[in-house]
Image: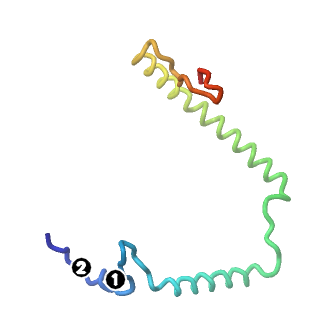
Amino acid sequence: MTMPEISSANKSSIGNKTVRSGTVYDFKMQERRRENLERAEKLKAELGDEPITGTDDRIAYRFVKRVFDFVFSAAVLVLLSWLFIIIAIVIKVDDPKGPCSSSRRAWVKTAADSKC
């Protein structure tokens, strides 16, 4: 079995990394950390000293978001209900004696047989 050829682009990127115990170590991590710190300092300078406010004080926004979540979820359930019905029919046709939904017996802490 021969080793595959390494392209020149890969050779230059491999020069900054080494493989040891199956793990690739990146020696340019310090440079990336420095870039991230510079980016954070720039963002802090742009925002100034004003505190960043969240959505806690925006009651109307939270209400509209909650209503949208509820309406959208209900609409998706209604739009996909035909698919759920078809799947239930296919399950019933495949096994007429079995239930369409999950039903099994489970042992509870009292070691009594109960139906879930």
Q: Secondary structure at mark 2?
A: loop
Tell me the residue at 36%/78% (across/down). Answer: 20
User: Which percent across, then down, holds residue 41?
Assistant: 68, 84
Disc 1 crowd, CA 10 A, few/some/many (<14, 14-19, 20+): some
Q: Nearer the viewer, residue 60 or 101?
A: 101
Q: Is residue 4 above or below residue 61?
A: below
- The disc labelled 1 sits on which kind of residue? Ile
**Image quarter in which the C terminus is found:** top right
**Does residue 90 appear left or right of residue 30 in this picture?**
left
Residue under numbered circle 1: 14
* Amino acid at dot 2: Ile
Where residue 114 sits: x, y (%)? 61, 21
Q: Residues within 10 Å of mark 2 (few under 14, many from 20)?
A: few
The residue under label 2 is 6
Q: Quadrant of the N terminus?
A: bottom left
Location of residue 11 with respect to 55 vertically, above or below: below
What residue appears at the point 45 percent right and 85 percent down from the top-left corner? 27
Horizontal relation, residue 17 to residue 100: left or right: left
Question: Which quadrant of the structure image shows residue 53?
Answer: bottom right
User: Residue at the top extreme?
Assistant: 97
Instruction: Give the image location of residue 99, x and y in percent.
Output: 51, 18
User: Where is residue 93, by image quadrant?
Assistant: top left
Q: Are marks 1 and 2 in contact (CB under 8 Å)?
A: yes
Q: Residue at x 35, y 78 (%)?
A: 19
